[in-house]
Image (cartoon, rainbow, N blue to C red):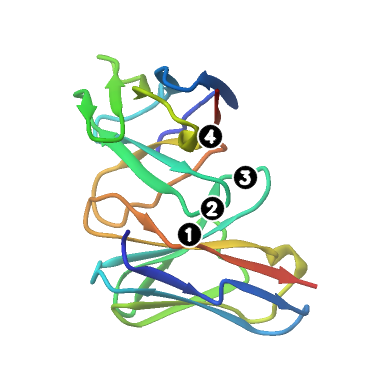
Amino acid sequence: DAGITQSPRHKVTETGTPVTLRCHQTENHRYMYWYRQDPGHGLRLIHYSYGVKDTDKGEVSDGYSVSRSKTEDFLLTLESATSSQTSVYFCAISQQDNEQFFGPGTRLTVL
Amino acid sequence: DAKTTQPPSMDCAEGRAANLPCNHSTISGNEYVYWYRQIHSQGPQYIIHGLKNNETNEMASLIITEDRKSSTLILPHATLRDTAVYYCIAQGAGGGNKLTFGTGTQLKVEL
């Protein structure tokens, strides 16, 4: 399996609090992605990164920010969590044109 | 990226071939067909991809029609562990593969 870890794996938080999810890779892949998955939907892209300090928005980026200060880490921040951000969050990595490898996911509940 | 259409669910007997169809009638010439699967609440797993030639790997075969408007993923000898949601994605070439997931096909392999 590709070396991708996500932390925390589970988190319960309250509306209005900041939350940061971490994705860590040991594969030295250039591209990193954050997706969310909700019942009845496939995965939807939140943000992605194409290199250190290079990021861009995905399909559902409102309410989320990201940072990538080094190749191996990609952070997803919810500045002020809302109940609509209750979801399962997946991180993925890839090289130039190759397939994406996904992490185990983080289950976030916002009360 | 082109939109894909898949049946919501399919059943298959263990040991038989599972043939999962996908329509991508608006696919453009430089878009690949990718298949991923997601086993209950795990991160998606890459299976196979192709442009216009049929492809085979240790997991599956991918048959793409000559006009490239549809494809079929074949699991030659399905097992219970192949029960999963299978996603067909038409994706442009180039760096930063931003996958657009639909709702996929729920394949249930039964004894």
Q: Is residue B39 left or right of residue B93?
A: right
Label 4, label 1: how far apart the Cα atoms are? 20 Å
Give the residue pinned by disc 3.
A41
Label 3, label 1: how far apart the Cα atoms are? 16 Å
Label 4, label 3: how far apart the Cα atoms are? 9 Å
What residue is drawn where x is 23% and y is 59%?
Answer: A95
Q: Is residue A89 left or right of residue B71?
A: right
Amino acid at dot 1: Gly
Question: Which residue appears farthest toward the front when viewing the image?
Answer: B111
| Residue A79 image offset from top left, x and y in percent | 63, 81
Give the residue pinned by disc 1.
A58
* Pointer 1 local density, CA inside 10 Å: few below 14, some 14–19, many at least 20: some
Sequence-wise, which precedes: disc 3 or disc 1? 3
Q: Nearer the viewer, mark 4 or mark 2?
A: 4
Determine contact: label 1, label 2, CB under 8 Å.
yes
What residue is drawn where x is 38% and y is 52%?
Answer: B98
Label 4, label 2: how far apart the Cα atoms are? 13 Å
Amino acid at dot 4: Gly
| Residue B67 image offset from top left, x and y in percent | 28, 15
Amino acid at dot 3: His
**Mark 4: which secondary structure?**
loop
| Residue A102 image offset from top left, x and y in percent | 41, 58
Residue A44's tag is 2
**Mark 1: which secondary structure?**
loop
What residue is drawn where x is 37% and y is 68%?
Answer: A4
Q: Nearer the viewer, mark 3 or mark 1?
A: 3
| Residue nearer the viewer, B58 or B97 | B58
| Residue nearer the viewer, A93 or B31 | A93
Give the residue pinned by disc 4.
B104
Label 1, label 2: how far apart the Cα atoms are? 8 Å
Residue A96 in which image quadrant = bottom left
In the rendered image, residues at marks 4 and 2 fall on the same chain: no
